[in-house]
Amino acid sequence: MRTAAEYIESLRARRLELWVDGERCASPVDHPKVRPAIHAIAATYALAHDPRWRELATARSALIDAPVNRFCHLFVEPDDLVKKISLQRVLGRLTGTCFQRCVGMDGLNALYLATHARPEAHARFTAWLAGVQRADDVLNGAMTDPKGDRSRRPSEQPEAYLRVVERRADGVVIRGAKVHQTGAANAHHILVMPGQALRPGEEDFAIACALPADADGVRMVLGRQPSDDRRGGPDAGNARFGGQECVVLFDDVFVPRERVFLDGDLAACAELVEAFAGFHRASYGGCKPGNLDVLIGAADLVTREHGVRRASHVRDKLVEMAHLTETIHGVGLAASEKSAQHPSGIWQVDPVLANVCKHNVTRLPYEIVRLAEDLAGGAMATLPSLAERDHPALAVGLAPVFGSEARAKALRLLESMAYGAGSVPFRIECMHGAGSPQAQRILLERAIDWDDKVARARVLAGLDPDDALGELS
Ligand SMILES: Cc1cc2nc3c(=O)[nH]c(=O)nc-3n(C[C@H](O)[C@H](O)[C@H](O)COP(=O)(O)OP(=O)(O)OC[C@H]3O[C@@H](n4cnc5c(N)ncnc54)[C@H](O)[C@@H]3O)c2cc1C
């Protein structure tokens, strides 16, 4: 397994085409807007070699008969799902941001499961996965298409969806874009998957394949984030780590047959999308509570510096923040504990609880941020830059405005997570990552057995006999 330093060095071997602020980036690994996100991924490598976390961060792969980083691992034991959530919480707390390897991990498990009943496709996929595990590579899980007019099908606006434009004996040519791609510029491979279930006539969009991040015709464009110009500077908020999203453009990219896992197989693609949604919605019960630990810690620190930590309403608000955070984590763990084995051998989360978990994530962090903003006071939004605090002409006058170093830095961290660069991989990801709130409600309505609830209500209302308990006396 790679070390953190080996991971960072491995990225330099790529000929990545990355655009940042209108310019082609000569050295993505060293760009100040990219590097903090690389550090967040590097943490996933560091844990695999740290005796404190090694057991959580690694697993034994039967595929290659060797230990692997958990982010390359298949969920072959029920405990793999639980350990995933625990590891995500640790990493969310250690980095305070998105560490970018979860979409790939959840995606490769969904693909393993969805290709299982197709022996040739499954053999191609497992051969590729074995290579990923041996190299300990990072995957960009690429599902979301630009989608254009959401009321129209892909076949009515093909340019808004990634699609196969040519099929050859030795592979396929794909064209289009994937948007909001977490960690794409820090990945070794792109794992392309459809973003939704597709209908007959939409086979060209039903493509799941893998390609190197620097394949010919792949172009990446870094997303802008609020206050991202502060990265690497004293006002960054999160001094070391950051998230990353890119648009990935596929300009007639050839994918060789051995890297094409599903092509036009609507049923397998539907199974893939649904399985991925379950895995990934539970994942938010790990990473986001970890991020929230940091947010709560920063708010707590400010109240200590302000001398109000013992006030009853402050204590109560901190308790409320912790309570909501553990509510998210608890459901993520429960979804993973209540798992069931797919015929492929992969363990799947409970779909209802996984969707409840992610749905909570679209709501509870917003209340937690509101409470953090309450406790922090207005300075989290109005504090001048630390450069002015340290300027000889202003330092004396600004000293009481800034207060201690701890107060100033905690306020900057809160600002970043609430609405600065850190809010993209934290708050906005809470809302839309793994699907917007309505996607979870649709699944919940479908998955819940409404008739079963009515049946029991009818029994207890005395309308029907009690077949479950019979006569008790
Ligand atoms: C920070 C971040 C990281 C992400 N990382 C990844 C990643 O690594 N890989 C990846 O593939 N994707 C990623 N995503 C994408 C994520 O899955 C999508 O944002 C999500 O599925 C919502 O899609 P959208 O952004 O296009 O919004 P939309 O789908 O446009 O949703 C916006 C609103 O429109 C509603 N809506 C959409 N379609 C319809 C319709 N037909 N009828 C009625 N209402 C509709 C939605 O319910 C929602 O309320 C990420 C997103 C974010 C924000």
Image: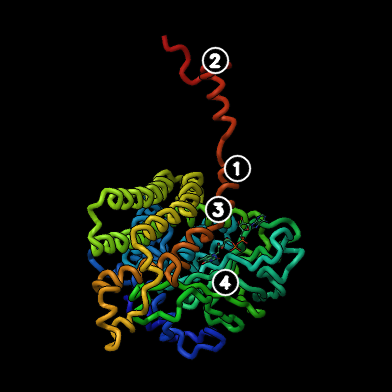
288 vs 278, left or right, is left
Closer to us: mark 3 or mark 4?
3
User: In this figure, which residue is indicated by the disc labeled 3?
Assistant: 437
Q: Earlier in the sequence, mark 3 or mark 4?
A: 4
Residue type at numbered disc 3: Pro
Q: Residue beneath label 1, please? A: 446
What is the number of the mark on residue 259? 4
Mark 3 element type: helix
Camera-side residue: 275 or 322? 322
> Can residue 372 be seen by looking at this rendering?
yes
Closer to the camera: disc 2 or disc 4? 2
- Of helix, strand and loop, which one carries label 1? helix
* Place of residue 403 in the rendered image (x, y in percent of width and height, measured from the top left): 25, 72
- Residue 462's label in the rendered image is 2
Density class for disc 2 (Cα within 10 Å; few <14, some 14-19, many ≥20) is few
Disc 4 Cβ-to-ligand 1 distance below 8 Å: no
User: Which element type, helix, strand or loop, lies under badge 2?
Assistant: loop
- Residue 440: percent from the left, percent from the top? 55, 50
The amino acid type of the residue labelled 1 equals Arg
Q: Quadrant of ligand 1?
A: bottom right
